[in-house]
């Protein structure tokens, strides 16, 4: 039995809807359930369920489509009841927040929510100021972020798809009000030990990060988390475009000043994608004027990779870099050395993808990508040109109407299968990013997919994973590494090391 | 290094999360202090206009000024005079409630009230003649008939809000901003002109008000001196009145203040004094006509501030619902007037009801009426609700307003001030519409009141206002 | 076992928390805080505390609205690998926080310190009894001339009722303030206190004194020292009574039953030790207070 309806005035975020669809689909009487906003992409999915598109319905309406195994009404009624229970939030756990407002009416805007928080009896040095975390779909993010600034709160904009002129307006307003805007598209931040967005569990310490890239910061923090006494004071994300000529580093300058004034920060590290030359110059001279030493380490050809930057940080504190942990497959590869073949990277982290491309391009030449190092290496959307390819699944073309690829592995699972079917593909390079907010158990999904991909092949296929996580992360770093080992993959805690290994395999220098 | 940024890193943050629930869950997993916004997308199609308005660099200061001025405004009853003098109405000119409307589109009660006003002014001898002249748009002597919104003349009129030159009006003054507003004298309940009734007893009462009540109150006011209406409103909301559908305490306090001078200085016989006292004391809504112009003074103070998104009028003419917004001056943004949901008198039912009508929603515009329901539990049943609904309604109104008025504070909410200054952007963002308590007029001209209940404005008024605010905002890419 | 409760743990007790699993025993419990002593070499104390509890430097802070387990003293659990397990419940460290260690008070002009001392002594009653006051006077004198403070310390340790006796609170306040001042007396006093405390006062107090000797304290004390320095907290004008100082003092006095008063008095004692000219102001006891 098939059922489809469109409901207006009901909104849930895409991750929540994914959870609801999964919870309803899990019932034995339900063959398939799609509870999603009625975007054109989601309406297209109805065809696969054998359901015609309903009349009406737009991206602000909720689409409920269910296919039950039985032909009787009871199964459908039960499925719809399940949808109601999940939508009402009484199903799987929903966090409304650690504090009630005491009014019985939940605050509906960022402004009213910030204003509903009173002072803290715990003391200023226990509880600092209010910061807003905006993760609405991108076209709504500007208003909520501006609302936070209006209410006197600094803001982290996790949302992507925010136009640059909106970013500039937000950051100018923040400058006027003495506040900080982190983002847009800011994946991670750590303030006073609290992780915002995708956050690794990192011990406090003397290193303050200013990061124009989320996964780049997560790589640095995760490596440092394994080193005693070189923890993180704060990590302030600024958004990938902050150091562009248009934005002019507005948040980078503010973040540098904030960390310079912070007594807990003894060393500031600035990381990110390649900046505009004039902005880089201004930032460097600003950094030179601070009383706290600053390591300015943007990513790019000829620049140190993130792992090398961590080495510099350790050196500053008189420590030397260890051999970063890696985990080879449990069973040795049955293949002899060579011949090489194509390197295919499927990344959830944009900076990890860029770093891997920089490393691979030095040896392998052109790396085709949707986020290419050079314009002439641009990969047409969803095409397969042959040769070496690295895809950032966090880029807009994959994320509209879907959760972030660090949460939702769906697109990557089908791409892994597609690469396995392509005999030209010799080595698969994947990233797995752990921490709060990310997929709760990545190896449970990726492990079987890797095993299946390798089993389907007649020719060698190596799988190398860049496993970014802190030993304290909730997914349990070691357990993840062991599950990936069992699936036949290599795992590296250093993304740069993973990329170098993948390059060796692609060249035919390594059997794995 | 400024304090705000220094504080950001001084300790753990208090996180306000809006959007993906997984990120709130991640905060809970860290035992972090956090609170989630009960967010949902704005009204469809308003996304770009919201961005434009939020990017307007004038908005924050303009709204702060609008709020400050609304709270600072004073309101004193200073005089009672004929509308011809105060409003400058000539024969053939009539004010009415709500946004502009012509005879052909006017609703039953609006047409009925205009007919009654023609009769009162002696411009027609019978309802049929009045109706014909109004339809033709000319008086018998050829003078053009003009229909003008009260709001456009700085005043307000309850229900049909029809004002003709010989009617006496209460004159209120805001000394802080040196502005004046006005409103007619309330006729009482039942069959009355403002509900569209124009039978002989209605016209007789209006004549008595014109000949006896108006002049005697004028004389009384000359002796009594200004009466601080703002202070009376502040007291009435702590006495179970919400200032729109319940004005009992306000009316009695006003009578208390007027009575000595009425006896001493009005020049009326004791029998006439008694009739005036009975008329005022017997009409619980007499004070509504003072709350309304006091509210109008508050919104006048906030009007015309470029970039401000504060609503300065909610008004209905029985056909259209119209709003005015500070940043767009005197422009009206209209949509169809809604049907009031509530309770009906006697054998009347929903089919007898006219759509929403009257300027009295000016009380909601300043945080009274439906916004103050929490403070008026005695009338929640009258408008078809429960005490819990009343509490929730008032609390919800704080989500769409910019400030709280300490002059009108609600004991039951721990003396929180009235939610004041409706923000167009918040209405559109939250989908929460201003809640209005109102009377229901009969659909057919001449019927009068048929009930009372709750109504909200149509969302399209706010969407259109937002569009105009966006069009008036500087382009996003321009200098901040 | 049920899903572990997330806790934000103090980095000051990181080693004991992430190390190998060891027994830990409940030594004290209040409605908002349960103290466990871990059987490691340092006998590290950890405190599972509600989000609203006073944030001691060894606290493992629960989510808002969660309360710590109410267990009798002597209950044994395990601590290690980032998890505390006791009585079938486990608490997992999901975040780290750094307890405040006030610094930089030494650079504050003495005139400013004197102003703060004047304001505080005029408004805050000395929480010690007569014998305690005499011990404080001896302590100040000993440290001023570089003599060993052991005797005075012994008379203060364990003096007064409660989980952290008032005499201990005074010593803790003094230790943190001396560290913040960068005063030479911090070293000998810290050594004397940590040496004598285990045999002289409660287990919980011993642990908190150890943190104090390292300069670690509750946030309210850090905020007060911040206010004394006249930095950081907004709206502290030339008149110390006009803003930050009264607020911070009020918040500190609200800590515990009388712990806040003891800590605050310790601040004054430290200022007297470091700046002998301020000693008169601190130690002059008004007759009214003395009679009480």
Image (cartoon, coloured by chain):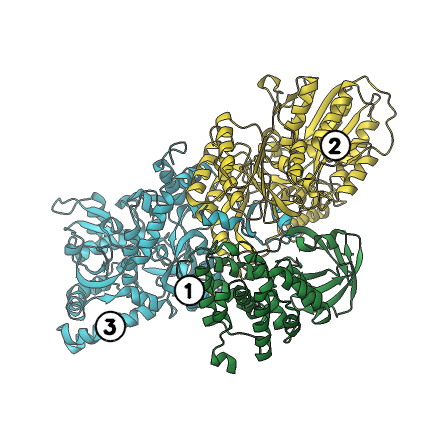
In the picture, the quarter occupied by the N terminus of chain A is top right
As drawn, the chain in cyan is: B
**In the foreground, B316 or B421:** B421
Asked if residue A122 can be seen in this view, the reply is no
Q: What is the chain identity of the residue bearing mark 3?
A: B
Q: How many marks?
A: 3
Distance between the Cα atoms at labels 1 and 3? Answer: 46 Å
User: Viewed as shown, does residue A366 lie left or right of C16?
Assistant: left
Residue B28 position in % (x across, y down): 63, 52
Distance between the Cα atoms at labels 3 and 2? Answer: 84 Å
Residue A131 position in % (x across, y down): 53, 48
- Looking at the rendered structure, the secondary structure element under dot 2 is strand
In the picture, the quarter occupied by the C terminus of chain A is top right
**In the foreground, A354 or A106:** A354
Identify the residue shown where x is 74% and y is 37%: A322
Query: Which residue in the protein does label 3 denote?
Result: B257
Figure colour of chain A:
yellow
Query: Which residue in the protein does label 2 denote?
Result: A465
**In the foreground, C226 or A64:** C226
Tell me if residue C229 comes above or below residue C166 in the rendering.
above
Query: Which residue in the protein does label 1 denote?
Result: C241
- Looking at the rendered structure, the secondary structure element under dot 1 is helix
How would you rate the neighbour count of disc 3 (Cα within 10 Å): few for under 14, some for 14-19, many for 20 or more?
few
Residue C71 position in % (x across, y down): 74, 68
Instruction: Give the foreground label among 2 and 1.
Output: 1
């Amino acid at each position: 039995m098939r059922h489809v309806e469109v409901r207006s005035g009901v909104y849930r975020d895409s991750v929540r809807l994914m959870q609801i669809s999964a919870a309803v689909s899990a019932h034995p009487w339900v063959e398939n359930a799609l509870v999603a906003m009625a975007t054109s992409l989601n309406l297209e999915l109805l065809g696969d369920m054998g359901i015609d598109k309903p009349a009406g319905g737009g991206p602000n309406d909720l689409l409920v489509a269910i296919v039950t195994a039985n032909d009787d009404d009871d199964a459908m009624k039960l499925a719809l009841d399940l949808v109601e229970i999940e939508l009402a939030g009484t199903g799987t756990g929903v966090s409304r927040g650690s504090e009630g407002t005491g009014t019985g009416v939940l605050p509906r805007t960022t402004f009213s929510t910030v204003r509903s928080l009173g002072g803290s009896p715990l003391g200023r040095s226990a509880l600092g100021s209010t910061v807003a975390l905006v993760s609405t779909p991108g076209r709504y993010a500007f208003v909520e972020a501006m609302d936070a600034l209006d209410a006197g709160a600094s803001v982290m904009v996790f949302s992507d798809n925010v136009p640059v002129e909106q970013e500039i307006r937000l950051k100018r307003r923040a400058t006027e009000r003495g506040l900080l805007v982190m983002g847009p598209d800011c994946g991670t931040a750590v303030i006073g030990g609290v992780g915002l967005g995708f956050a690794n569990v990192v011990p406090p310490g003397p290193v303050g990060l200013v990061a124009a890239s989320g996964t780049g910061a997560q790589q640095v923090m995760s490596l440092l988390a394994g080193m005693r006494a070189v923890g993180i004071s704060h990590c302030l994300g600024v958004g990938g475009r902050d150091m562009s000529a248009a934005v002019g580093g507005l948040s980078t300058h503010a973040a540098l000043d904030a960390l310079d004034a912070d007594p807990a920060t003894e060393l500031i590290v600035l990381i990110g994608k390649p900046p505009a030359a004039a902005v880089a110059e201004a930032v460097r001279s600003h950094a030179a004027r601070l009383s706290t030493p600053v390591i300015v380490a943007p990513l790019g050809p000829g620049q140190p990779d993130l792992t090398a930057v961590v080495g510099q940080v350790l050196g500053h504190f008189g420590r030397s870099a260890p051999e970063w942990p890696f985990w080879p497959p449990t069973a040795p590869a049955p293949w002899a050395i060579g011949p090489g073949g194509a390197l295919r990277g499927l990344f959830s982290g944009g900076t990890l993808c860029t770093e891997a491309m920089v490393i691979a391009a030095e040896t392998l030449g052109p790396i085709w990508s949707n986020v290419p190092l050079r314009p002439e290496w641009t990969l047409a959307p969803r095409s397969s040109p042959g040769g070496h390819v690295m895809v950032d699944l966090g880029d807009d073309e994959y994320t509209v109407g879907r959760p972030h690829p660090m949460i939702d592995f769906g697109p990557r699972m089908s791409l892994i299968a597609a690469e396995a079917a392509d005999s030209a593909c010799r080595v698969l390079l994947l990233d797995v990013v752990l921490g709060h907010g990310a997929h709760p158990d990545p190896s449970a999904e990726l492990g079987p997919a890797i095993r299946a991909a390798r089993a389907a092949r007649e020719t060698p296929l190596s799988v190398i994973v860049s496993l970014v996580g802190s030993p304290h992360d909730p997914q349990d770093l070691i357990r993840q590494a062991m599950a990936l080992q069992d699936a036949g993959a290599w795992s590296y805690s250093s993304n740069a090391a993973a990329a170098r290994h993948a390059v060796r395999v692609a060249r035919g220098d390594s059997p794995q | 290094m400024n304090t705000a940024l220094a504080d950001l890193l001084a300790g753990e943050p208090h996180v306000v999360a809006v959007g993906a629930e997984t990120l709130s869950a991640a905060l809970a997993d860290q035992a972090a202090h956090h609170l989630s916004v009960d967010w949902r997308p704005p009204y469809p199609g308003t996304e770009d206009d919201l961005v434009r308005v939020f990017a307007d660099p004038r908005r924050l200061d303009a709204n702060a000024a609008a709020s400050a001025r609304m709270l600072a405004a004073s309101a004193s009853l200073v005089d009672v005079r004929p509308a011809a003098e105060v409003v400058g109405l000539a024969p053939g000119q009539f004010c009415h409630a709500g946004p502009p409307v012509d005879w052909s589109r006017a609703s039953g009660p609006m047409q009925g009230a205009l007919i009654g006003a023609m009769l009162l002014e002696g411009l027609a001898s019978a309802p049929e003649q009045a109706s014909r002249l109004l339809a033709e748009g000319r008086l018998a002597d050829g003078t053009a008939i003009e229909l003008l919104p009260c709001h456009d003349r700085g005043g307000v009129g309850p229900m049909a809000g029809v004002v003709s030159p010989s009617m006496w009006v209460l004159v209120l003054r805001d000394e802080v901003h040196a502005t004046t507003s006005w409103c007619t004298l309330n006729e009482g309940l039942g069959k009355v002109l403002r509900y569209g009734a124009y039978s002989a007893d209605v016209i007789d009462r209006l004549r008595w008000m014109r000949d006896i009540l108006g002049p005697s109150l004028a004389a009384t006011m000359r002796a009594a001196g200004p009466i601080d209406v703002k202070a009376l409103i502040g007291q009435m909301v702590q006495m179970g009145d919400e200032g729109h559908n319940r004005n009992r305490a306000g009316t009695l306090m006003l009578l208390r203040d007027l009575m000595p001078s009425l006896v001493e200085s009005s020049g009326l016989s004791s029998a006439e004094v008694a009739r005036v006292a009975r008329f005022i004391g017997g009409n619980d809504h007499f004070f509504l006509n003072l709350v309304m112009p006091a509210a109008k003074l508050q919104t006048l103070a906030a009007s015309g501030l470029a970039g401000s998104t504060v609503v300065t009028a909610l008004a209905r003419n029985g056909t259209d619902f119209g709003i005015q917004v500070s940043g767009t001056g005197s422009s009206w943004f209209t949509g169809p007037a809604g049907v009031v949901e509530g309770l009906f008198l006697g054998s009347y039912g929903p089919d007898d009801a006219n759509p929403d009508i009257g300027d009295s929603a000016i009380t909601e515009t300043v945080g009274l009426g439906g916004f103050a329901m929490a403070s008026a539990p005695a009338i929640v049943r009258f408008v078809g609700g429960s005490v819990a609904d009343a509490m929730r309604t008032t609390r919800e109104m704080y989500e769409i307003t910019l400030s709280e008025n300490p002059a009108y504070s609600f004991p039951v909410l721990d003396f929180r001030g009235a939610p004041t200054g409706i923000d167009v952007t918040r209405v559109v963002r939250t989908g929460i519409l201003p809640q209005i308590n109102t009377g229901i007029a009969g659909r057919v001209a001449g019927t009068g009141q048929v009930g009372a209940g709750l109504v909200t404005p149509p969302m399209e008024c706010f969407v259109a206002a937002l569009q105009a605010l966006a069009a008036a905002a500087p382009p996003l890419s321009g200098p901040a | 076992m049920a899903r572990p409760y997330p806790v934000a743990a103090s980095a000051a007790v990181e080693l004991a928390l992430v190390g190998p699993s060891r027994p830990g025993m409940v030594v004290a419990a209040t409605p908002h805080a349960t103290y466990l002593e871990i059987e490691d070499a340092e006998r590290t104390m950890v405190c599972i505390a509600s989000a609203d509890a006073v944030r001691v430097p060894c606290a493992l802070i629960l989510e808002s609205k969660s309360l710590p387990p109410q267990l009798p003293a002597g209950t044994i659990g395990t601590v290690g690998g980032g998890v505390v397990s006791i009585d079938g419940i486990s608490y997992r460290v999901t975040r780290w926080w750094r307890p405040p260690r006030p610094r930089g008070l030494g650079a504050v002009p003495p005139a400013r310190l004197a102003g703060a001392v004047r304001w505080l002594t005029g408004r805050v009653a000395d929480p010690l009894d007569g014998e305690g006051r005499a011990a404080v006077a001896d302590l100040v004198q000993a440290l001023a001339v570089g003599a060993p403070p052991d005797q005075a310390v012994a008379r203060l340790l364990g003096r007064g009722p409660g989980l952290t006796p008032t005499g201990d609170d005074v010593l803790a306040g003094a230790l943190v303030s001396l560290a913040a001042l960068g005063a030479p007396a911090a070293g000998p006093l810290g050594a004397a206190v940590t040496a004598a405390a285990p045999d002289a006062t409660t287990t919980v107090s011993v642990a908190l004194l150890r943190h104090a000797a390292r300069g670690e304290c509750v946030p309210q004390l850090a905020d007060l020292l911040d206010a004394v320095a006249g930095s950081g907290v907004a709206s502290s004008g030339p008149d110390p009574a006009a803003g930050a100082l009264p607020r911070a003092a009020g918040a500190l006095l609200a800590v515990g039953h009388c712990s806040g008063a003891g800590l605050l008095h310790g601040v004054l004692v430290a200022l007297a030790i470091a700046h002998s000219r301020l000693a008169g102001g601190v130690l002059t006891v008004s007759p009214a207070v003395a009679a009480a």
